[in-house]
């Protein structure tokens, strides 16, 4: 079975500071991994995904994530936070593109001016 | 990119009534759609997998007689909450799987259901 653990339900950073959102996964097979962003009362927007190609994945809005098999991690980073990055972020895993996603509990990112 | 729509975006209904939520894939065909439920400040929980032309597959603990799913065409799945109770109030999100190429899932904007 697949599972995702997001460390830290709330992360607060200053504008311009590094953003680091942590995600660890558990999977019995090589996983597909995703990061989604959700703004209040909206659906999910895909930031980036890992599907067994390059381990460093670049996404939209300047975000990137690195797949580290040895650490079973897929942390999300952005070099410089913007106010518009304040939102809820979800890490998700699936064993294949054909099965539903299993989501982590989410991390709320606050950006302080 | 692929677009998934949901209708309505918000709905308020009285206890005991039924509410239907539509999920449409606008520019691709989806034999499989997924319905998720999200409580305030919590993650998404998979409710069921909707399969075109066949019965939906429900997750453990989800009442299939209460949450009726119909996937009558390759672009439309509906979720009907029957005999709604206040505890059914939640944010319902669907996703549709693009069957061509990438097998990627695209999410709808969600439907906020409030049962009074």
Image (cartoon, rainbow, N blue to C red):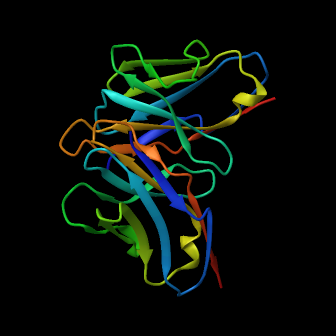
Percent position (x, y) of residue B93? 53, 39
**Is residue B113 among the parts visible in the rendering?**
no
Q: Is residue A26 above or below residue A110?
A: above
* Residue shown at the point (48%, 67%) measured from the top left: A22
Q: Is residue A33 above or below residue A11?
A: above
A9 on left or right of A85: right
Percent position (x, y) of residue B78? 49, 23
Percent position (x, y) of residue B27? 31, 39
| Outermost residue, front side | A70
Q: Quadrant of residue A83?
A: bottom right
User: Which residue is at the front of the view, B89 or B111?
Assistant: B89
* Residue shown at the point (43%, 74%) measured from the top left: A77
| Outermost residue, bottom side | A16
User: Which residue is at the front of the view, B96 or A67?
Assistant: A67
* Residue shown at the point (52%, 80%) measured from the top left: A81
A10 on left or right of B95: right
Quarter of the image with the C terminus of chain B in it = top right
**Is residue B17 among the parts visible in the rendering?**
yes
* Residue shown at the point (41%, 24%) measured from the top left: B50
Q: Quadrant of residue B52?
A: top left
Q: Quadrant of residue A25?
A: bottom left
Percent position (x, y) of residue A71? 35, 65
């Amino acid at each position: 079975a697949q599972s995702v653990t997001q460390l830290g339900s709330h992360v607060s950073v200053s504008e311009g500071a590094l953003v680091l959102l942590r995600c660890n996964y558990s999977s019995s097979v090589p996983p597909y991994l995703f990061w989604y962003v959700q703004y209040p009362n909206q659906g999910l927007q895909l930031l980036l995904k890992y599907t067994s190609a390059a381990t460093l994945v670049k996404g939209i809005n300047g975000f990137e994530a690195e797949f580290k098999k040895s650490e079973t991690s897929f942390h999300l980073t952005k070099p410089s936070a913007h106010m518009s990055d304040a939102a809820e972020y979800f890490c998700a895993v699936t064993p294949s593109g054909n099965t539903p996603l299993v989501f982590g509990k989410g991390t709320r990112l606050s950006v302080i001016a | 990119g692929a677009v998934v729509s949901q209708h309505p975006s918000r709905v308020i209904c009285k206890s005991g009534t039924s509410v239907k939520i539509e999920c449409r894939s606008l520019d691709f065909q989806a034999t499989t759609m997924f319905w998720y439920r999200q409580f305030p400040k919590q993650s998404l929980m998979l409710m069921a997998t909707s399969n075109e032309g066949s019965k939906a597959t429900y997750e453990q603990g989800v009442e299939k007689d209460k949450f009726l799913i119909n996937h009558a065409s390759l672009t439309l799945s509906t979720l009907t909450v029957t005999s709604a109770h206040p505890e059914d109030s939640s944010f319902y999100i669907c996703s549709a799987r693009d069957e061509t190429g990438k097998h990627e899932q695209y999410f709808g904007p969600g439907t906020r259901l409030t049962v009074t």
